[in-house]
Image (cartoon, rainbow, N blue to C red):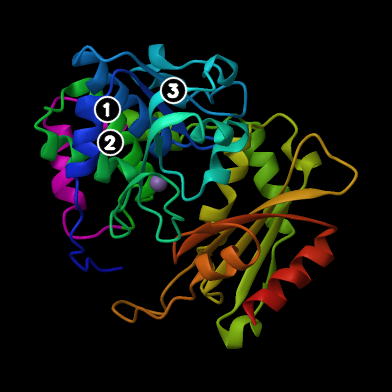
Amino acid sequence: MTTTGTAVDYSATVRALDAARSVTILCHIQPDADTLGSGLALAQVLDRRGVPVRVSFAEPAELSTGLRTLPGSRFLVPPAEVPTAVDVLVTVDCGSAGRLGLLADRLAGATTTVVIDHHRSNTRFGSINLIDPDAVSTASVLTALLDSWGEPIDAEIAHCLFAGLATDSGSFRWVTPGTHALAERLLATGIDGGAITRTLMDTHPFAWLRMLSTVLASARLEPAAHGGTGLVAAFVLATDLAGVRQEEAESVVDIVRATAEAGIAAVFKEARPMDARRRWTVSLRSKDSGPGTDDGADVAAVATGLGGGGHRYAAGYTTYGDPEEILAQLRTALG
Ligand code: MN
């Protein structure tokens, strides 16, 4: 991954936020630390400026234990409390309107819609689109926006931004020039970076170990997939998730993608509760064959073709069927 130095224009977003009478910030469904951290960081800035602000996401009803520790959660409201007509509506870390879930209908009732994101596959569904596909995280885009706006970053805002940066960079494994400089700047506010990452990424219930042992034992390696790039796939069945949270299911792909023999990793996670047609959310990861090769498969293209989206090296989609069917569907899409 390299920085191409795309010029990003922050002025339209700054003008919209400056003129806002109130701001509604929407995070994507199944929020992660990047969408929520970005949303809560922006909410704190707006509140400091005296602008009424609320933050919401469509589902699930409850935040994970780790995400509940982010500063600014006082601005969170349940989706039912987001009016149908709002002034400025800002979405953070959403590549498409569909990522808003049931709150997507609020876009139509907003005076101005601002889309702040870093997904290359972003569909530019706002009236203002602040998208930097070279940014490691939406938190990085937000930091640049705050700089452009002249808004300082205090420790509580830095905590939220660091959470997004650390999570989306995979604990600083997927980085670009500037990633560590940004981390250093946020850490200099006095936040405890170690505690933030441990809380968000390295804390799991004991049942997580049992879930991993079952799921990893089911992993399959298909060396011929995608013209010999190789695919490693694992299935997280709804029954495997007893005693663990959705975020534990999200951790599986980080282990599976380490497989040396496969350039592409897929983890199929069965939705709970189980419905008649088995529903799965699928996480795809790809990697280059070596340093500087830049030859990793574009899984965003694959996911987009299957109704999802994401980044070149990390993407996802939703599908239905039995394990054999959905694996065959992916094999076909990979070509
Ligand atoms: Mn993100």
Quickly name the residue at label 3.
Answer: 86
Q: Residue drawn 24% across and 29% down? A: 17
Quickly name the residue at label 2.
Answer: 162
Furthest residue in direction bottom, as rendered: 227
Can you tell which of label 1 and label 3 is closer to the viewer?
A: 3
Location of residue 167 by image quarter: top left
Q: Can residue 69 be seen?
A: yes
Say what amino acid the circle numbered 3 marks.
Val
Q: Residue 328 — which label?
A: none
Label 2: which secondary element: helix
The percent coordinates of residue 156 (x first, y second) are 24, 21
Vertical relation: 13 (above or below) 277? above
The local crowd at label 1, few if under 14, some if 14 to 19, many if 20 or more residues have their Cα within 10 Å, is: many
Q: Residue drawn 25% across and 45% down? A: 140
The CA span between labels 1 and 3 is 28 Å
Q: Which residues are magenta?
A: 175-194
The CA span between labels 3 and 2 is 29 Å
Label 3: which secondary element: strand
